Amino acid sequence: MVSTYYPPYHYGGDGVFVQGLARALTAAGHQVEVVHCEDAFRLASRESSASFSDASSPENDGVIVHRLNNHCGPLSPLITQQTGHPGLKQAALRRIFARNFDVVNFHNISLVGGPGVLALSRAAVNLYTLHEHWLICPTHCFWKNRKEVCQERSCIRCCLQSGVPPQLWRYSGLVRRALRHVDVLLSPSVYTARQHAEAGLGRPVRVLPTYAASVVDPSTNDATAPPARPRFLFAGRVTASKGVDWLVEQFSRLPQYDLDIVGKGDLLEELKRRYAACGWIRFRGAAMHSEMPGWYSGATALIVPSRAPEVFPLCILEAFACGTPAIASAAGGTPEAVETSGAGFVYRDQPGFLAAVAQLAEQPGLRGWLGERASAAYQRSYTEEKYVGAYLEIVDEILRTKRPERALATQASVSAGVRS
């Protein structure tokens, strides 16, 4: 597994997902190693809401973790960001990739090696999981000029206004050349698969919906039942692209309902000051991942008001695992799990949003019914077992298309437990 971020040096859902997948494969009998850039986390923690989060005994979970750090510190990921190559991490990565891995799964590679890291793998199977839109958007999320959804590309100007150093290598064909070393792009959502297929990257794209990792089963935890007074939840980064400012503004006019904001980000302090008089809106700050089942289970519904087109929000699946429905915006892949399961509402405008909130708040039976649908959808489609099974089937399919002699030997390793 190759990822820029990995617990406890991470922020956002991609690090949590990579850890969950690594542990799941290890539990299934595979040998799994993870390489990530610790320097990238320290650089990001100075510029954003990045912070340490809990990781349950990472040194005892069977996963071998290579945490890259260089004496030049933040200069290492900065060189990678500007050149699209591992740079100061090149030697360390070459030593790791020289090992005889059967499968290499690239995740967020933006600062751990850029596109150049893809060519270092010698594995029989090379996968790339699309946690973000970084391959086709330098800001990762189609959030233009830090204020609006991107409708027309003007990447250099957008980078300058967004505080992201422009990357001239994006105009050199490096991404397309590097992707020749990847067998398939794994997309958590139909939306993201379509965006990358239309970009003409030259690689096949498979839709493989993600799953909720490390969420405690509500039947075995001590989470309380939903409160008598309607209480809604936002969980994630408190930024404009997530739509948190819009969400809080809506609830400032809904004193009959409570809203908990769990997370932190660059808008947190401003919103706390602006809405200090709204006692029904509570800014809880960051929470440990192990604490989230209690927040989900105790909410009338999770609200995902994203303005930028997300890939496939992990928080929706975590809420489903706890029997909690969701209210989601129609941005990108954000609504797909809700639409597929029918376990909540998807809104496209303010009236639609307010109607969804009112229905869930004023019809307790509806919350219970949608919560049952959420739990059923999780068990049917979004469990670790479902994901890992589909994931390994894709590995087998790729092996069957390889040269027979190499495929036969590697497939035998996959069946017995592979090095990943």
Image (cartoon, helix red, strand yellow):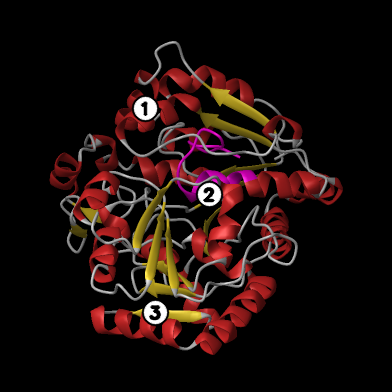
**Residue at the disc numbered 2:** 128
Q: Secondary structure at mark 2?
A: strand
Residue at 34% over, 67% down: 305
Task: Identify the image quadrant of the N terminus.
Answer: top right
Q: Secondary structure at mark 3?
A: strand
Residue 105 left/right relative to 200: right
Real-space Cα distance between discs 1 and 2? Answer: 24 Å
Residue 97, visible in the rendered structure: no
Q: Secondary structure at mark 1?
A: helix
Q: Which residues are magenta?
A: 1-19
Please give the count of numbered marks on the rendered protein.
3
* The quarter of the displayed image where residue 246 is located: bottom left
Residue at 64% over, 62% down: 223
Circle 1: residue type: Leu
Going from the N terminus, do you reach mark 2 or mark 3 first?
2
State yes or no: residue 178 in magenta: no
Real-space Cα distance between discs 3 and 1? Answer: 36 Å
**Residue at the disc numbered 1:** 43
Residue 48, visible in the rendered structure: yes
| Position of 77 relative to 250 (above/below) | above
Q: Which mark is residue 149?
A: none
**Residue at the disc numbered 3:** 346
